[in-house]
Image (cartoon, grey):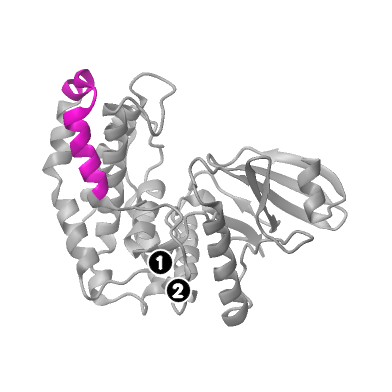
Amino acid sequence: MESIFEFYGWDVLKAVQMHQGLINSTYIINTTSGEFVLQSVNHTIFKDPAAIDHNINTIGSYIKENHPGYLYTYLVPTLNGNTLVEWEGKYYRAFHKIDGYALSVLDNPIQAKEAATQFGNFTQILEGLDMGKLKITLPDFHNLSLRFHQFSEAIIHGNSNRIQDSSNAISFLQSHKWIVDQYVKFIQHADVKQRVTHHDTKISNVLFKQIEGIEKAICVIDLDTVMPGYFISDIGDMCRTCLCDVSEEEGNLDLVKVDGAKWEAIQAGYLSQMETVLSNFEKDHLFFGGQFMIYMQALRFLTDHLNNDIYYGAKKEGQNKVRALNQIRLLEVYNKLK
């Protein structure tokens, strides 16, 4: 790491690796000139780290000019002015450390509303940014039509034993293809537009801080997946990851429940920022966002199971099937909210 520190001219007092987050390696670097967050970008997932660097800087420049008071994770330049360092086959970038903390689970609807408000505000303040200036960091990331096609291929070409063993889950997902059809109609509608979308709106991607004794969400973080997209990706991922008290790894499906109060809080927080930005047609699809995202993740988990766990991997036999069944149950209980 000493070689990386030299790029920034840091006099390092202490470096500690953080173990939050699954994709990038993250370190807190304490120096004589302040605290920084240093990350090694996982370029097996993100094939074009330069595209991420471009997007974060492009958004940062727009915010500095148009919303200078907004708290944003600006990249720190090296001594030669670069914000992406390539060293020995790896890619690194640094941010100023922001005083705050991330949550791993939601305890109450107030936190849900705070997080949704921040994600909505992030998209809202960037409404004027030309989408043509941003690059795609993960092609087809939330393309539901593609995910259903991959699922359909896995049913034909996947592991025959797993296909037979998963027949009930396969039938369920096939019977809900109407979600794919509705997604296609949604993105093709004249009143729907692409905006700056985070695409990974789990609770750990918002920083919180105690302000005068009140827990407030202060900043959106982890911007690797930020690119042009549809708002249903963000509202949907909040529904998928914030409404249930157990994770997608939970095999006891009786524990998979949704909290209606948290759904109301997410909706209220998001619309507090996006009410005047979204079209009436888009606002009519807030609930659909959750259906879209939960269904897509069920498809992806079962597809990987049928394909012998080549994408997500599995630490134990049938792990991706458990995840798929978890998301199928989540979709079932979520649908009952409406």
Mark 2, residue position: 124
| Residue 268 horizontal/vertical position (percent) | 38, 67
Q: Does residue 219 appear in the picture of this structure? A: no
Q: Are marks 2 and 1 in contact (CB under 8 Å)?
A: no
- The verdict on residue 150 being magenta is yes
SS under mark 1: helix
Q: Does residue 2 appear in the picture of this structure? A: yes
Report the residue at 63% width, 58% height from top: 209
71 w.r.t. 50: above or below: below
> Residue type at mark 2?
Gln
Report the residue at 33% width, 52% height from top: 142
Name the quadrant containing residue 275.
Answer: bottom left
Report the residue at 42% width, 72% height from top: 131
> Residue type at mark 1?
Tyr
- The verdict on residue 224 being magenta is no
Task: Write the start and end of the magenta stretch as one range.
Answer: 146-165
